Amino acid sequence: VGGALMYCWALADPLAATEVVEAVPFIGPALRADAAALAAAHGGIAMMLGSFTGLPYKVFAVQAPATGMGLATFLLWTVPGRGARFLCSALIAAALARLLRGRIAAPWMRAAWLCVWVSIYTGYWTQMTD
């Protein structure tokens, strides 16, 4: 739903939509340029590639109308674009949980889960500021 709203907003007022997205911390013209280059080279699959390279989905959403991508096409690419990373994360998490279940108590499992996600996002945001 959010992607469709961003797309429609960018269709109606691309400058305002882009300015708001670029006001989000760690998102700026450089990321927009990277996403535009990826989209120009790969079309809709760029959203899927972007999810593994740190390019935020919202950047693709506000750029899609300018590339000539229709809303239906954008939404069709959204499913694998957003889902691939989440599916990989869920499969890895499930495998680790199955491996550790019974070896550590549930509260420690939750603490480990929290530490892993904090570490991943800390690494991501640290890398984005370099």
Image (tube, rainbow, N blue to C red):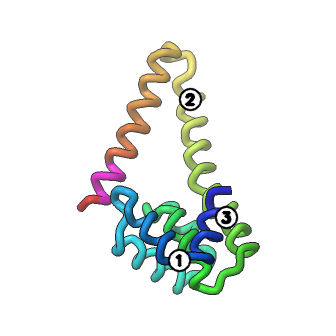
In the picture, measured across the screen, residue 105 lies left or right of residue 33, that is right
Along the viewing direction, whichever of 46 and 10 lies nearer the viewer: 10
Type of amino acid at the residue the image marks with label 1: Pro
Q: Earlier in the sequence, mark 1 or mark 3?
A: 3
Please report whichever mark, 1 or 2, sits nearer to the chain's N-terminal start.
1
3D distance between C-alphas at marks 2 and 3: 34 Å
The span shown in magenta is: 123-128
Q: Residue furthest right?
A: 72
Write the residue at 59% across / 65% down: 6
Q: CA distance from mark 1 to mark 3?
A: 14 Å
Q: Which image quarter holds the N terminus? A: bottom right
Residue at x 40%, y 66% (from the top left corner): 22
Q: Position of residue 124 (x, y in %)?
A: 36, 52
On whether residue 37 falls in the magenta region, the answer is no
Binning the other alpha carbons within 10 Å of mark 1 as few (below 14), some (14 to 19) or many (20 upward) gives some
Pair 1/2: label in front: 1
Residue bearing the label numbered 2: 97
Q: Which is more N-terminal, label 3 or label 2?
A: 3
Residue bearing mark 3: 4
Q: Eyeballing the image, is 50 above or below 2?
A: below
